[in-house]
């Protein structure tokens, strides 16, 4: 199957170039519609020097992204995918990279976990933990799930 | 917004100048989505948060960079919430990309697109408080609707075209900043043949539309009506031909000056 994905990053201040990847979003097609799967780790090490807004956005990111997917579905242009719209609108302290495509035979959540382990620093241990203890129970959930510092959610994209 | 004091000299300078000769370098934060127009963040010594360079995509029908510069200069003179802009000729421009660009100054170390702000207030247990605070804050920016009407803004109903900027080290300086003025003025030659006479309501996202303060919009219309025809012409006519040809400049000048006295009546009858 063909998927598209974007890496989500957090840059605490635009005054410095330091940033960290904290999540991935993967978009897969299902018939005429699709699904966007998000997996990320919570941003626990936010500098104390950033604003309360930054902390609030970071703390609510999984829920905010679910809302952003809904916005994208409503507002994206013809020929634009959900991830295109999201990455066009996340250019500042919370960023989404230009979407990339890949082919993979695994289901969307498995692809997301693989990309998460590859692109997010410190993700390997979290993914390994998931694979060894809870792999059998992973299903695209209806609401955001929390396990340690790992969060994931799936949002259906209507046709 | 309260314009950051540390950048006020830069704003004055950028209003006076037309083209940037600064050695801008692409930001090392890597590849981000370029947006509809194409663009990316750039850095240069002397500008703490850098700037945003655009467009990179060629648009034969719209002088996007010149539109951005003209609107930024008008906004600076009239006190609207638009960042300073300079034209910029890209060096080493890849084939097939636009080299007549502009740089828009980034004013704050933290920026949040207003679409994200609305999504925050839609979260459980946050809506009532945040709607009240953000709505009251946004209402103070109602005057920018007058600017958008004047320039014929078509791209304001967009989650990313207004951002909330804040400097945690100086919270007194911050607020909403209105971006993206490429699709304005004689966009796609729509003001030719007296097309400028058609004033239509700016498409606005409901959270902003719901809190607009009409007296503030009317006061802004008065400010716009007060700028002289010569002042407008001076801002438009200094655009280099390569960024906006002379015939196009004439249409823009005629349109801006012709629309000035029409705004108040339009607002009275529409808002």
Image (cartoon, coloured by chain):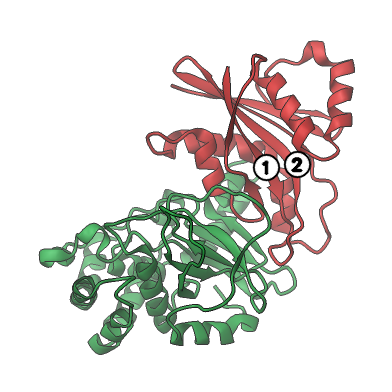
Chain colours: A red, B green
Residue B124 visible somewhere in the drawing: no
Residue closer to the observer: A119 or B185: A119
| In this picture, residue B48 sits left or right of residue B114 | right
Q: Secondary structure at mark 2?
A: strand
Vertical comparison of B216 with A136: above or below: below
The disc placed on residue A8 is 1
Residue most extreme to the top? A136
The quadrant of the picture occupied by the C terminus of chain B is: bottom left
Residue closer to the observer: B201 or B211: B201
Using the rendered view, name the quadrant where residue A5 is placed.
Answer: top right
Tags 1 and 2 touching, CB below 8 Å: yes
| In this picture, residue A7 sits left or right of residue B60 | right
Q: Residues within 10 Å of mark 1 (few under 14, many from 20)?
A: many
Residue closer to the observer: B178 or A20: A20
Using the rendered view, name the quadrant where residue A134 is placed.
Answer: top right
Q: Secondary structure at mark 1?
A: strand
Q: Whole-percent x and y of residue B146? A: 33, 69
Both labels 1 and 2 in a single chain: yes
Name the residue: 58% across, 61% down.
Answer: B41
Distance between mark 1 and mark 2 Cα atoms: 6 Å
Report in which chain the residue with disc 1 lies. Answer: A
The quadrant of the picture occupied by the N terminus of chain B is: bottom right
Q: Whole-percent x and y of residue B156? A: 40, 56
Name the residue: 83% across, 34% down.
Answer: A123
Using the rendered view, name the quadrant where residue B45 is placed.
Answer: bottom right
Residue B88 visible somewhere in the drawing: yes
Q: Whole-percent x and y of residue A36? A: 59, 27
The disc placed on residue B152 is none
Name the residue: 61% across, 49% down.
Answer: B31
Q: Which residue is mark 2?
A: A22
Residue closer to the observer: B20 or A79: B20
């Amino acid at each position: 199957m063909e998927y598209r994905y974007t890496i989500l990053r957090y840059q605490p201040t635009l005054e410095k170039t330091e940033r960290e990847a904290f999540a991935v979003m993967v978009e897969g097609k299902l018939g005429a519609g699709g699904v966007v799967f998000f997996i990320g780790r919570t941003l626990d090490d936010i500098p104390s020097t950033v604003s309360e807004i930054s902390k609030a956005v970071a703390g609510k990111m999984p829920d905010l992204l679910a809302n952003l997917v809904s916005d994208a579905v409503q507002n994206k242009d013809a020929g634009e995918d959900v991830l295109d719209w999201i990455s066009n609108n996340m250019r500042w302290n919370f960023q989404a990279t230009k979407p990339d495509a890949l082919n993979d035979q695994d289901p969307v959540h498995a692809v997301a976990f693989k990309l998460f382990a590859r692109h997010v620093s410190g993700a390997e241990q979290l993914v390994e933990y998931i694979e060894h203890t809870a792999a059998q129970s992973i299903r695209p959930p209806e609401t955001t799930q929390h396990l340690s510092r790992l969060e994931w959610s799936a949002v259906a994209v209507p046709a | 917004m309260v314009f950051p004091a540390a950048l006020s000299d830069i704003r004055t300078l950028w209003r006076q100048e037309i083209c940037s000769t600064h050695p801008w370098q692409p930001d090392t934060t890597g590849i981000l989505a370029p947006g509809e127009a194409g663009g990316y963040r750039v850095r240069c010594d002397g500008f703490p948060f850098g700037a945003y360079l655009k467009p990179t995509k060629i648009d034969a029908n719209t002088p996007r960079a010149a539109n951005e510069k003209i609107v930024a200069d008008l906004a600076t003179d009239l006190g609207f919430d638009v960042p300073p802009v300079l034209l910029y000729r890209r060096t080493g421009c890849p084939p097939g990309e636009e080299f007549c660009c502009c740089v828009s100054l980034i004013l704050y170390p933290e920026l949040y697109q207003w679409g994200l702000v609305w999504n925050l207030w839609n979260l459980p247990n946050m809506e009532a408080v945040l709607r009240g605070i953000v709505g009251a804050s946004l209402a103070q920016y109602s005057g920018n609707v007058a600017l958008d009407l004047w320039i014929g803004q078509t791209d304001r109903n967009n989650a990313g075209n207004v951002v909330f900027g804040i400097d945690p080290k100086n919270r007194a300086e911050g607020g909403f900043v209105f971006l993206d003025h490429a699709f304005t003025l004689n966009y796609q030659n729509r003001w030719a043949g007296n097309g400028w006479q058609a004033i239509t309501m700016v498409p606005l996202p409901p959270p902003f539309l719901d809190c607009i303060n009409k007296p503030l919009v009317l006061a802004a219309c008065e400010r716009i009506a007060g700028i002289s025809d010569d002042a407008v012409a001076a801002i438009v006519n200094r655009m280099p031909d390569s960024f906006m040809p002379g015939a196009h400049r004439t249409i823009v000048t005629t349109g801006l000056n012709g629309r000035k006295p029409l705004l108040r009546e339009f607002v009275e009858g529409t808002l």
